Image (cartoon, rainbow, N blue to C red):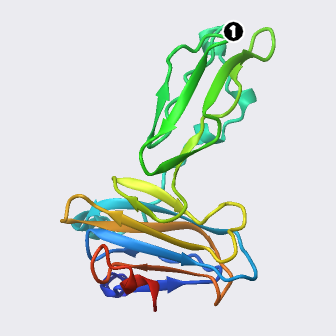
Amino acid sequence: MEGKRRRRRQKMRFTGTNLPAPVISNKNWLRLHFLSDGNHRQKGFNAQYQVKKQMEIKSRGVKLMPSKDMNQKTSVLTQVGASQGHNMCPDPGIPDRGKRIGSDFRLGSSVQFTCSEGYDLQGSKSITCKKLSGMIAAWSDQRPVCRARMCDTYLRGPSGVITSPNYPVQYDNNAYCVWVITAVNPAKVIKLNFEEFDLERGYDTLTVGDGGQVGDQKSVLYV
């Protein structure tokens, strides 16, 4: 029953440190509005959205957790090229919602990374294959990640990540950010899952809703 009540509400406002339950839109779009005052700052929030058919969400009835890309957390020292010889680095991979330029992984070679529209690169734009010791070759840095732009962004696509400004560092005072997620298919809905949530209780808020029209900011900016 709680899940059904949550889906019927046009907007919800979150504050404090309790992790919000997943939010499912009634329509093919969802708007988030983050607002902070001029006093205390907290760590902020990290959320992942997915575009799904409503029947898929109802039939599974589980919280959809984002996949953990272990390659993003692998240190340079563990990215060894032992299986490919000491003159070549392992395939660095391609960041989600991004591209890699270059396929030469030999010593001294470099590859570059870019992100899709609406996403910003966090990490090194270029990494180089270097020799760490006589038998070990590794990249000069980790593969970067593509994050949704911090504020005032229109997002499309099957999935993505939204974070408060500066996350995981404290967000700014007097922040004012709006994100609009839209599914191209009008028969689909948006599901939003929070991984971390830490706002100043009662003063800094995140409002999530789908009331009004896509371009109507007023329906979500005021509660």
Assign a secondary structure to mark 1: loop
Question: Is 175 displayed left or right of 219 in the figure?
Answer: right
Question: Is 119 displayed left or right of 16 in the figure?
Answer: left
In the rendered image, residue 200, in percent from the top left (x then y), is placed at 68, 82
Work out whether residue 92 can be spotted: no
> Camera-side residue: 34 or 141?
34
Which residue corresponds to the image point at 62% horizontal and 28% vertical from the top-left? Answer: 126
Question: Is 187 displayed left or right of 79 in the figure?
Answer: left
Name the residue type under label 1: His
The number of numbered discs placed on residues in the rendered structure image is 1
Q: Residue furthest right?
A: 133
In this rendering, the answer to whether 79 lies above or below 131 is: below
Which quadrant of the view contains residue 82? top right
- Mark 1 Cα-neighbour bin, 10 Å: few <14, some 14–19, many ≥20: many
Which quadrant of the view contains residue 70? top right
Quadrant assignment for the N terminus: bottom left
In the rendered image, residue 189, in percent from the top left (x then y), is placed at 28, 67
Work out whether residue 6 can be spotted: yes
In the rendered image, residue 104, in percent from the top left (x then y), is placed at 54, 13
Which residue corresponds to the image point at 66% horizontal and 34% vertical from the top-left? Answer: 142
Which residue corresponds to the image point at 52% horizontal and 68% vertical from the top-left? Answer: 194
In this rendering, the answer to whether 172 lies above or below 202 is: above
In the rendered image, residue 215, in percent from the top left (x then y), is placed at 31, 74
In this rendering, the answer to whether 124 lies above or below 107 is: below
In this rendering, the answer to whether 182 lies above or below 199 is: above
Which quadrant of the view contains residue 128? top right
Look at mark 1 in the image and give the residue it sits on.
86
